[in-house]
Image (cartoon, coloured by chain):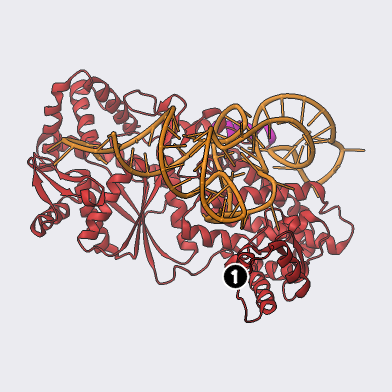
Chain colours: A red, B orange
Amino acid sequence: MHVLHEAKQDAWKILKQAFGKGYTPSIDEIEQPPDPKMGDLAFPCFSLAKGLKRNPVEIADEIAAKIAPKGLIGKIESKGPYVNFFFDQKTFGKKLFDDIFEKGDSYGGSDIGEEKRIMVEYASLNTHKDPHIGHLRTIFLGQLLVHLFKKVGYEVIAATYIGDLGTHVSRCLWGLKKFYANIEPPKKDQNKFLGEVYVRAVQALEHEPLAKEEIDAISRDIEAKRGDNFFWWKKTREWSLREIKTIFKELNLPIDAWYFESGVTSISKKTIAHLLKKGIAKKSDGAIIIDLYEEGLGVNLLVKSDGTLLYNARDLGLAFKKQGDYHPDRSLYVVDSRQNLALQQLFVTLKRMGFEEKLEHISYEFITLKDGAMSARKGNVIRYQDFRDQMEQIAREQTLGRHPDWKTKKIEETAKVIASSAMRFSILHQDPGRKITFDMKEALSFEGCTGPYLLYTIARISSILRKASSLEKKKKNVIFSSAVEHELLVFLSFYPDILFTTAQDIHLSRISQYLFDLSKKFSSFYQTVPILQESDENKRISRLTLIQATAQVLENGLKLLGIRTLEEM
RNA sequence: GCACCCGUAGCUCAAUUGGAUAGAGUGUGUGGCUUCGAACCACAAGGUUGCAGGUUCAAGCCCUGCCGGGUGCACCA
């Protein structure tokens, strides 16, 4: 049990004792006050007042007068309609520090997922298209989910589902034949080349409505694995996959299972045959559909009238394939909100088929530009690699400016970590339910609520620790006198609860918000209270203990976000 | 037309899921480096939480209606 929870229980026990048998408050009623000055925990008296038909302020006063501090609670007072509890700093702090230093990297984890297996499908990119900044959301959110669920004890299967079939692929091959037939394909950056071919094809197709039949023919050839089209599909698919794998490696994405649209054809066809037999699916206008009007979800279109499978059909097959391969208890889909309906249809259809595992869509809004959504047609797509290069360039310049004496290799490595932190944090600190309006200038800023700010906090702590005596670093103490110290101390105890709650409601931005707030509290503490300059040995050691604990929590949290940390920057 | 999401400080976003005085970043103004790293800190100005009703001890959050933006809705993925 973590320390905050223990303190809450102590407060709860005190309350229970005060009420006797007449009333038992729930431990969940105990909350954290908005301002730490009010106290560390609070018990609101509103529901009690309602039951007794009395003034909550009077009740709070009465309770506060009746009870005495105990355990981790050091002081109790009433304020307005609240009974506020203050921690006994010494016992609370000692317990907290013991917990953090004993657990180290694993501080904050739990075992709520024990014996449970969860599958997270994310980073499902398409071949034959250039990865762009819009894809970063599924990538970073998915990766965070994988890390988080592992941290709280689940067995996690990280999966990705690559779109290597479909209209976009056929269009790209069509463009390749039409405009590049006599051109030798490039030896490197082949995926970028394919991206350009795709854009050109899409733009050309606006004026060539008759080309649709040619595109369909290409799709049929690929599905039937025949001829020139199939040959080029295989070749170009490899180009894209190589690129995707390079990016995944660069971003350190854990992927246990690779799935491909082209790999679920036969299982999808079997599934559809089964659906038709059971009467769940039916023919309509030559196509195969599932009528979901009863659930208010319209029709789920599975197979086109020419017999080719649609995305929804393949997703059905995929679900069975995943289940057969891993038998997860829960299955998460990190997919953008434009597919809300499609995924609802998928889930309902699977349920009708008796599918039992828990399916959840982790929906997020997509990333747009100031002048509207990115689209291949408009040609206003910001490639991932271009964005990354710009980030790294700025980080490189700033690092070089600060450390002219550093070797090129060290500057290079530092710049990569800084750029990566900026990219990840800017996406993860925002609520996935809201669209991100991408602004390059803002994205390239390393000040304020940014990844580099968090890295900077750790770098400053590391710098102090390098200068501190190794003997004093090993000692631990809890002698604090100022409010900033107390606030920082208590804030560290929230971390396990943050992870626990987030794993349950999957409100992923909470973690980044917490880490930023933690950094702010450290900075404020750092500015007002001397550490190495403190002359009192006990106080000095206490503060060294506090900043070591802060660094540990920050590092643990950033690791969840996929951000590496630096001792110097 | 129907469904879902979003309207909070000039801009970008928070708000413990119905609780205490709606908070941060950025931008603007001011102050702080001979002192532990200024990618920092402190202070100031900045709000009718899109509008109008309703529910209750209490509403940015819930309900109804309207306004504005986005997305999806049968052969795209």
Answer with left or right where residue A31 lies relative to residue A559.
right
Can you say whether A340 is above or below B28 in the image? below
Answer with left or right where residue A357 lies relative to residue A153.
left
**Is A396 in front, or is A24?**
A24
In magenta stretch: residue A235:
no
- Tell me what residue is drawn at x 14 percent, y 47 percent: A289
Please, which residue is most extreme toward the right here?
A: A535
Quarter of the image for the C terminus of chain A: give it: top right
Q: Residue A178: image x %, image y %?
A: 18, 22
- Tell me what residue is drawn at x 61 percent, y 31 percent: A397
- Tell me what residue is drawn at x 23 percent, y 21 percent: A206
Dot 1: element: helix
Q: Of the residues shown, which amino acid type is indicated by label 1?
A: Ile
Disc 1 chain ID: A
Magenta portion: prevailing SS class:
helix
Q: Quadrant of residue A155?
A: bottom left
Q: Residue A141: image x %, image y %?
A: 45, 48
Quarter of the image for the N terminus of chain A: give it: bottom right
Q: Residue A419: image x %, image y %?
A: 55, 38
Q: Is residue A274 visible?
A: yes
Q: Is residue A476 visible?
A: no
Near mark 1 (Cα within 10 A), the count class, few <14, some 14-19 or many ≥20, is: some
**Is A124 in front, or is A459?**
A124
Residue that mark 1 sits on: A27
Provide the residue span drawn in magenta: A392-402
Can you say whether A339 is above or below A178 in the image? below
- Tell me what residue is drawn at x 69 percent, y 67 percent: A97
Q: Residue A350: image x %, image y %?
A: 23, 57
Answer with left or right where residue A42 lies relative to residue A252.
right
